[in-house]
Image (spheres, grey):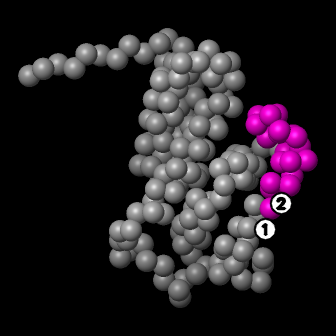
Amino acid sequence: MVEEPAIAIPDELDRAFRAHHGLVFRTAYRITGNAADAEDVLQTVFLRMLRRTDQAEALQSEESYLRRVAINAALDVLRLRRTDQTVELTDLPNRQTTGDVSDLRRALGQALSKLEQRSAEVFTLRFFEGFTNPQIAQMLGISQVLVAVIVHRTRRQLRKELSAYLGDRS
């Protein structure tokens, strides 16, 4: 049996993992709604960080960087799921239970996967992570006005996508 060589993990990356793995997992779980997918995202995020040549830059703004990468990786999972043509019978929506939270969560995930990357990222930071517009603007290096515009347009687009679930509340 051939033993694979161990991968050397830099101390900074190990420290970042220990400090922020919970944040990355929670962020991914809020988006995917699935623990297995969140675990996959967690691995993806730290593998990306390991492969980065400019690790010093990522580690300087570590929490913000990891949150953004987790959001994008989770959205990638949703997009991949959307393009997957196989459907479990248990996953078929039941029109009689359109008020069911799990159906709404699945519909929201599908709607998020259709958004442009920046829009999905801003929406996730604002409504899933609870950041304010000024905080998001600082994290992404854009103006507060642009954040507000993106939030407004994204909410309008999501209302349209989720109109079957929102009914008159939209």
Name the residue carrying label 1.
Answer: 156
Q: Nearer the viewer, residue 72 or 164?
A: 72
Asked if the stretch drawn in magenta spans residue 138, the answer is yes
Residue at 80% x, 56% y is 151
Name the spot of residue 162 as percent of width and height, x first: 66, 74
Q: Is residue 17 visible?
A: no
Residue at 64% x, 38% y is 68
Left-right relation of 146 to 55: right
Q: Report the label total.
A: 2
Q: Residue at the far bottom: name it.
A: 96
Left-right relation of 9 to 97: left
- Amino acid type of disc 1? Arg
Query: Tags 1 and 2 in contact by the CB under 8 Å rule?
Result: yes
Name the spot of residue 101 as percent of width and height, x first: 58, 70
- SS at mark 1 in the image: helix
Name the residue carrying label 2.
Answer: 152
- Is residue 78 depicted above or below 106 in this figure? above
Q: Is residue 170 visible?
A: yes
Tell me where the magenta segment starts and ends, as one range.
133-153
Residue at 40% x, 63% y is 84
Mark 2 is surrounded, within 10 Å at the Cα level, by few (under 14), some (14 to 19) or many (20 or more) other residues, namely: few
Which quadrant is the N terminus positioned in? top left
Name the spot of residue 79 as percent of width and height, x first: 51, 57
Q: Nearer the viewer, residue 45 or 114?
A: 114
Asked if the stretch drawn in magenta spans residue 78, the answer is no
Residue at 60% x, 44% y is 71
Could you give the CA–CA distance between mark 1 and mark 2, rounded to whole angstroms?
Answer: 6 Å
- Is residue 28 depicted above or below 86 in this figure? above
Name the spot of residue 134 as percent of width and height, x first: 87, 40
- Amino acid type of disc 2? His
- SS at mark 2 in the image: helix
Quadrant in which residue 39 is drawn: top left
